Amino acid sequence: MLFARWVETPLGPMLALGDDAHVHLVEFAERRGLEREVQGLRKRLGAAVVPGATPALEVLERELADYFAGHAFAFTAPHALAGSEFQRAVWRELLRVPAGETRTYAEVARALGRPSSARAVARAVGANCLALVVPCHRVVGAGGALTGYAGGLARKRWLLEHERRALAR
């Protein structure tokens, strides 16, 4: 079973899915491709989705509240990084980007030792289904341009500004 929770945030509702051990998905409700992500997750895990809570989802909900209150920007809720080896490497690299900072796709590719893989990094970032937990909003285009956020560029801008304001206090 995958249990589903709706989490209200200042940027709109988020859907969180988890099982007894991990959070598997956290996305803004109107994320492009959300239905496809949920169906793929159901198929991969052979699980039905039902309303409910798990300890991991409860931790996540508290941590999201702390994030939006500007108190903490790291997530400790156990989460599953389900993807290819390259995708998981990209997502682990994103976890190293401090709150309030950004990295370009090319910088992430160089950090992985694959400097010519910026486009593959962009695809891996786009495949992340753990919004905020794996901070894909901290990845920007060349020159710092805000690009490619499935939750919308206005949200990406807000999240980056929120982190910077909170850290400046």
Image (tube, helix red, strand yellow):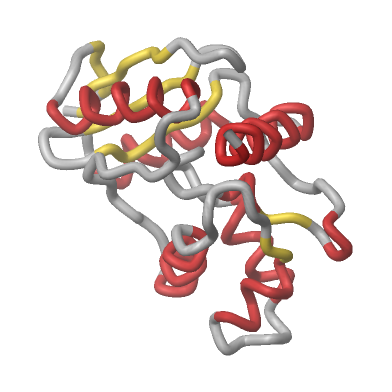
* Quadrant position of residue 109: bottom right
Residue name at image x 49 percent, y 23 percent: 68
Where residue 79 sits: x, y (%)?
Answer: 28, 46
Where residue 6 sits: x, y (%)?
Answer: 39, 13
Is residue 38 or residue 163 the one in the foreground?
163
The vertical placement of 167 against 58, above or below, is: below
Residue name at image x 56 percent, y 40 percent: 167
Where residue 58 sits: x, y (%)?
Answer: 21, 23
The vertical placement of 57 against 13, above or below, is: below
Residue name at image x 61 percent, y 17 percent: 11
Is residue 89 or residue 69 the one in the foreground?
69
Quadrant for the C terminus, please. Answer: top right
Where residue 56 sits: x, y (%)?
Answer: 19, 33
Quadrant for the N terminus, please. Answer: top left
The vertical placement of 126 against 71, above or below, is: below
Numbered label tally: 0
Q: Is residue 49 left or right of residue 55?
A: right
Is residue 30 or residue 70 the one in the foreground?
70
* Quadrant position of residue 5: top left
The vertical placement of 68 against 98, above or below, is: above
Q: Is residue 106 left or right of residue 12?
A: right
Is residue 39 or residue 65 the one in the foreground?
65
Residue name at image x 47 percent, y 61 percent: 91
